[in-house]
């Protein structure tokens, strides 16, 4: 039903076809719109990516066949031209503790160009038609939740918070977003001190970033594996990818002790050394690509980073494409 597919369709379309974050990354306004029990947040700063070599490669890949190109053009016409400079300015994803088995979540999209109910209806009708469903709307606290099939707003959907802010997600969370935006609900993720502190440390101006608190249930699941035992004390994680001048990856794991951080770094160092000597890696000629990979233990944190210039990225992409062609995966 559109309740879930609307969110999935729009999110995938926006991600693949350039829903964008503003150049400054996550804002306090984004945290201030999602529920306080958010545990994981993700940002995609496509505005930073526009014009880069990686951006062009991604768009060429996404539009590599006539069907995807047609779907892209139809989505842009019915909803919003997500690939243009006037496209959406931000996308912000928030999720709760997923180990509890819940299916909640919310996505906030900031628009550069204003949207009204008429445009929202047109967009909703387009997506529902793609899912062989009929668009329905439900009024909730002065806002329309766009949905389809049975269940109405209880199953979630898409809502226009204001002329330049869209939200969609599960029925529970999309209603919470409406209540928070309208002032009915006084608390939000900005009151989640642990998450706010983590986001402040993240490189939110990078192209893609994420930050999350690790629940006890997730840690408990690692305790029984001797190889993963040091990870069992992990409290939080954050990381980012950037494509401004090639490819840069940065990640941090916050552990319960300096010893655990050192143990993880020791394992990573050993595995990296083994990978460089792996016959298959050497045969593919990518062993040198592992040289820029850096790991270190910084107190109780494990840090991983790697940076490639554009020439190195192009070489890796070329090798990958050649490998795929060799297996008949690309034509």
Image (cartoon, rainbow, N blue to C red):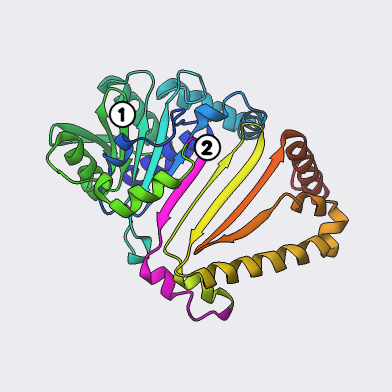
Q: Residue furthest front?
A: 299
What residue is shown at x 85% (from left), y 64% (from top)? 279
Q: Residues within 10 Å of mark 1 (few under 14, many from 20)?
A: many
The residue where tag 2 is placed is 206
Quadrant in which the C terminus is drawn: top right
* Mark 2 or mark 1, whichever is nearer to me: 2
Left or right side of 68 for 150: left
What residue is shown at x 66% (from left), y 48% (from top)? 306
Q: CA distance from mark 2 to mark 1?
A: 22 Å
- Total numbered labels placed on residues in the image: 2
Q: Secondary structure at mark 2?
A: loop
Comparing 221 with 239, the one in front is 239
What residue is shown at x 65% (from left), y 40% (from top)? 247
Q: Is residue 34 above or below residue 101?
A: above
Q: Is residue 222 magenta?
A: yes
Comparing 325 with 275, the one in front is 275
Mark seen at residue 224: none
The residue where tag 1 is placed is 165
Q: Residue 20's x, y, as percent?
A: 46, 30
Q: Are marks 2 and 1 in contact (CB under 8 Å)?
A: no
Q: Which residues are magenta?
A: 205-226
Left or right side of 141 for 207: right
Q: Residue 23's x, y, as percent?
A: 47, 28
Q: Residue 47's x, y, as percent?
A: 50, 27
């Amino acid at each position: 039903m559109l309740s879930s597919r609307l969110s999935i369709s729009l999110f995938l379309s926006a991600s693949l076809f350039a829903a964008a974050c503003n150049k400054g990354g996550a804002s306090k306004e984004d945290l201030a719109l999602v529920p306080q029990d958010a545990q994981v947040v993700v940002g995609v700063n496509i505005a930073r990516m526009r014009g880069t070599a990686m951006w062009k490669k991604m768009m060429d890949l996404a539009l590599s066949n006539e069907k995807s190109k047609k779907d892209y053009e139809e989505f842009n016409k019915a909803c919003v031209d997500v690939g243009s400079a006037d496209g959406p300015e931000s996308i912000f994803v928030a999720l709760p503790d997923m180990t509890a088995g819940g299916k909640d979540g919310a996505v906030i999209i900031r628009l550069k160009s204003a949207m009204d109910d008429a445009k929202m209806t047109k967009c909703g009708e387009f997506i529902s038609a793609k899912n062989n469903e009929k668009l329905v709307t439900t009024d909730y606290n002065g806002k329309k939740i766009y949905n389809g099939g049975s269940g109405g707003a209880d199953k979630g959907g898409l809502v226009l918070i204001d002329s330049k802010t869209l939200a969609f997600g599960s029925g529970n969370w999309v209603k919470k977003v409406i209540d928070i935006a309208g002032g009915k609900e006084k608390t939000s993720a900005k009151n989640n001190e642990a998450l706010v502190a983590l986001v402040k440390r993240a490189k939110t101006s990078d192209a893609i970033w994420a930050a999350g608190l690790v629940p006890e249930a997730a840690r408990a699941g690692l305790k029984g594996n001797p190889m993963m035992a040091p990870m069992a004390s992990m409290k939080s994680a954050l990381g980012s990818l950037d494509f401004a001048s090639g490819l840069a990856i940065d990640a941090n794991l916050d552990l319960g002790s300096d010893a655990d951080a050192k143990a993880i770094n020791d394992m990573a160092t050993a595995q990296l050394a083994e990978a460089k000597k792996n016959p298959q890696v050497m045969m593919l000629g990518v062993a040198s690509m592992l040289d820029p990979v850096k790991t270190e233990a910084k107190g109780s944190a494990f840090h991983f980073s790697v940076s490639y210039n554009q020439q190195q990225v192009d070489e890796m992409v070329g090798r990958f494409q050649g490998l795929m062609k060799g297996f008949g995966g690309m034509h």
